[in-house]
Amino acid sequence: MRLLLISNSTNAGEEYLSHPKENIREFLGDKKVTCLFIPYAAVTFSFDDYEKKVQDRFLQLGHDIRSIHKFLDPVQAIQEAEAIVIGGGNTWQLTRMMQENNLLDPLKEKIQNGTPYIGWSAGSNVACPTIKTTNDMPISQPLDFKVLGVIPFQINPHYLDANPEGHAGETREMRIEEFIEANPDIYVVGLREGTMLQLEEDKLNLTGPRKARIFKRGQAPIEVDPGSNINFLFE
Amino acid sequence: MRLLLISNSTNAGEEYLSHPKENIREFLGDKKVTCLFIPYAAVTFSFDDYEKKVQDRFLQLGHDIRSIHKFLDPVQAIQEAEAIVIGGGNTWQLTRMMQENNLLDPLKEKIQNGTPYIGWSAGSNVACPTIKTTNDMPISQPLDFKVLGVIPFQINPHYLDANPEGHAGETREMRIEEFIEANPDIYVVGLREGTMLQLEEDKLNLTGPRKARIFKRGQAPIEVDPGSNINFLFE
């Protein structure tokens, strides 16, 4: 499998999809690739607008996208795709629409057969076994929390270390500690903004300017450096 | 109905259940009340510990609690309760356990018949029609997102206005804007820390040192002052 699972589209103060642009370019290679784009995480803007925004960026990188909502047969579009891209937004809406359109199995099969997959934020969440480590508000009820499961561990995108000063709500770490208490056999990768996981064949790599924080029940959280071997997440 | 729906147990830098203590005391009245406590939102600590922590506080206020996990027949415990208290923690775990133990209908009936209800954080979330405006991580999958529905609007507890500096993830307002887009007919009350809603007979009141921010689709968010009439939320 070939996966590029990005924490976030946009760093604070930067342009849309700016921080991962070289990673996306290299991941897709020198030859122009037209990716199938899944825009279903968009809630407060249209799929057309989402397609345009992402397409503008991909064209700058020498690649292109076409959104699945423009195809008459979305399953066929998946089966014929050169690469799959799922963008961020609301993970719940994304999951529900993929389930209602019966796209999870075709997507999983396609990705497992080696078609490159790029996701950011909600698009990284749905690569996991479930959406149980999303940060998003559960604005719509999906049929099930199970999603693609092309990796055996959970990602928490936009991982952040502290609340705003004076706020007493749970920190992200406290939330993940609840997750591992209720789900003891699975790793969670707290993927900080600006970073991503890349899987090439059997090698999993953390890329970006910051460490990732990895949680599992019964273990103290560990910080891993960009570039270090994190294949233990597949154990 | 009599409801006291509190945003959060604890303000930053204060003791547990300190900010709402006078409100709880007055809400329960001069005569000692022993409340039935539902501790199911606890994930990383035991129900016994949770009962003890809340009991210590209620005893200081001249009242008492007993946790539902100590009763042989939880439905009977609800039916015989003088008052109901649901504490914070993880809304998903709380919802799932209430559903699995078939407690939602007995609780709803009991509260609608006038038994005083106090909730904070997750305990305020489950008074709403659904848990779709929780901030909590969906660590376990409930049978359904529907909960008590003793009020017709949604509460977002621990409402906060900004992300930590440098963090680009969705703000709370962006998340609630997604909710109202997907759920256009319902109000959301962004209930800031230190504040609460109190319903007495037919009068709904905001109490505490901060305004609440109220959202509905097609309207600009409005800020309401403590003490102002917010009965329009029942329309």
Image (cartoon, coloured by chain):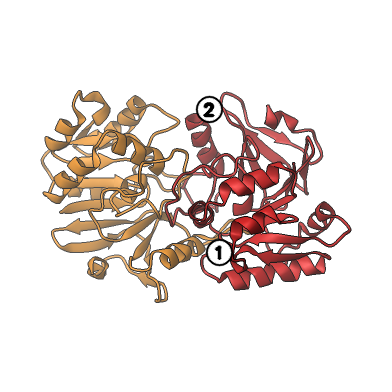
Chain colours: A red, B orange
Q: Does any portion of residue B20 appear in the rendered image?
A: no
* Residue ranking furthest to the right: A30
Q: Residues within 10 Å of mark 1 (few under 14, many from 20)?
A: some
On the picture, is B113 further left or further right than A76?
left
Marks 2/1: CA–CA distance: 32 Å
Q: Which residue is mark 2?
A: A184
On the picture, is A213 further left or further right than A208?
left
Counting from the top left corner in percent of width and height, residue A146 is at 52, 42
Q: Residues within 10 Å of mark 2 (few under 14, many from 20)?
A: few
Task: Identify the secondary structure beneath mark 2.
Answer: loop
Task: Identify the secondary structure beneath mark 1.
Answer: loop
The amino acid type, in three-letter code, at marker 1 is: Ala
Quadrant of the rendering where the C terminus of chain B is positioned: bottom left
Quadrant of the rendering where the N terminus of chain B is positioned: bottom left
Front residue of A111 and B231: A111
Q: Which mark is residue A21?
A: none
Counting from the top left corner in percent of width and height, residue A176 is at 54, 38
* Residue ranking furthest to the bottom: B219
Chain of the residue where label 2 is placed in the rendered structure: A
| Residue at 44% over, 67% down | B181
| Residue at 13% over, 37% down | B79
Please report whichever mark, 2 or 1, sits nearer to the chain's N-terminal start: 1
Counting from the top left corner in percent of width and height, residue B26 is at 18, 49
| Residue at 65% over, 35% down | A214
The amino acid type, in three-letter code, at marker 2 is: Pro
Front residue of A141 and A79: A79
Point out the frontmost of discs 2 and 1: 1
Q: Which mark is residue A42?
A: 1
